[in-house]
Amino acid sequence: MILIDAASWLLILAGCFFILVGALGMMRLPELFTRIHAASLIETLGAGFLFAGLMIQAGFTQVTLKLLFILLLFFFTGPVITHALAQAAIEAGIKPELAEDRRGRLDEDGTAPASGDDGRPS
Amino acid sequence: MFTAAALAVIAALVLVVVRVLKGPTLFDRVLAANSVGTLAIIFLAVLGFVNGRPEWLDIALTYGVLNLIGTLAILKFFRHGDLAHDAGEDDA
């Protein structure tokens, strides 16, 4: 019994760690597209570990099912919102800052070229 | 231990709210506001365990659905200028 408790506390601690790292990334990272990465950390690893720990605490009850539903909601809505946000930002003319300058591959109005030479679908 | 988790979530909320206030672009604010919603859901779930009333998860679930709709509505509004935009209308 104490082993199960320890496992759940460990999972909750890991979740707290990733939530704090994600929030710190939201503060410290330099521009929008890197901050999207930090935000996704909160709702995948952070919420995932934390809710796994809570599920172990709740046992095999209805509470576990609800936690599972919230996790499923995160896993489906996170990518949708991130994709819509990145698309809207690119369309508004915000370009990602890259270490290697590849901005010439984007057209002047901020939309991706029709056929990129890097094989990405436009 | 649940209280410690709740405190961690509050600390994360403070950091993300600072990002909402700082910007600098609109999309940074939208992203941070969405993260505030996500953290609020996590906070509600943890708080339910702190108080020994996990029924609060229902509120968290509802909040999650509203968070998705709200963020997508804001993004659509600022991308097209109105919420009733028909994508096939101007075939850009």
Image (cartoon, rainbow, N blue to C red):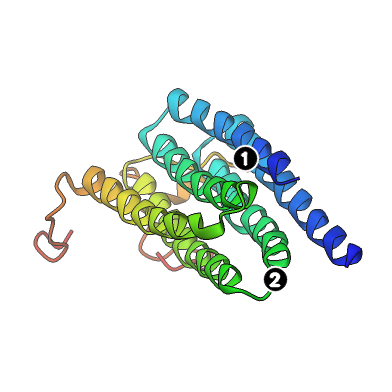
**Position of the C terminus of chain A by quadrant:** bottom left
In the picture shown, does residue A119 fall above or below B59? below
Residue A29 seen in this snapshot: no
- For label 1, the crowd category at 10 Å Cα-Cα, with few meaning under 14, some 14 to 19 and many 20 or more, is many
Q: CA distance from mark 1 to mark 2?
A: 23 Å
Look at the numbered disc 1 and give the secondary structure of its residue: helix
The single residue placed furthest to the bottom in the displayed view is: A60
- Residue at 82 percent across and 55 percent down: it is A10
Q: Is residue B45 left or right of residue B61?
A: right
**Observer-nearest of A121 and A47:** A47
Task: Residue A66: give x, y in percent of width and height.
Answer: 52, 68
Left or right, residue A95 beside residue A17: left
In which quadrant is the N terminus of chain A drawn?
bottom right
The percent coordinates of residue A18 (x first, y second) are 70, 47
Question: Which residue is labeled 2 in the image?
Answer: A59
Residue at the far right: name it. A3
In the foreground, B64 or B73:
B64
- Asked which quadrant contains residue A7, the reply is bottom right
Dot 2, crowdedness within 10 Å: few (<14), some or many (≥20)?
A: few
Q: Amino acid at mark 1?
A: Val
Amino acid type of disc 2? Gly
Identify the element where label 2 is drawn. Answer: loop
Tell me residue A13's x, y (percent): 78, 49
Q: Chain of mark 1?
A: B
Q: Which mark is residue B9?
A: 1
Have a look at marks 1 and 2 and say if they share a chain: no
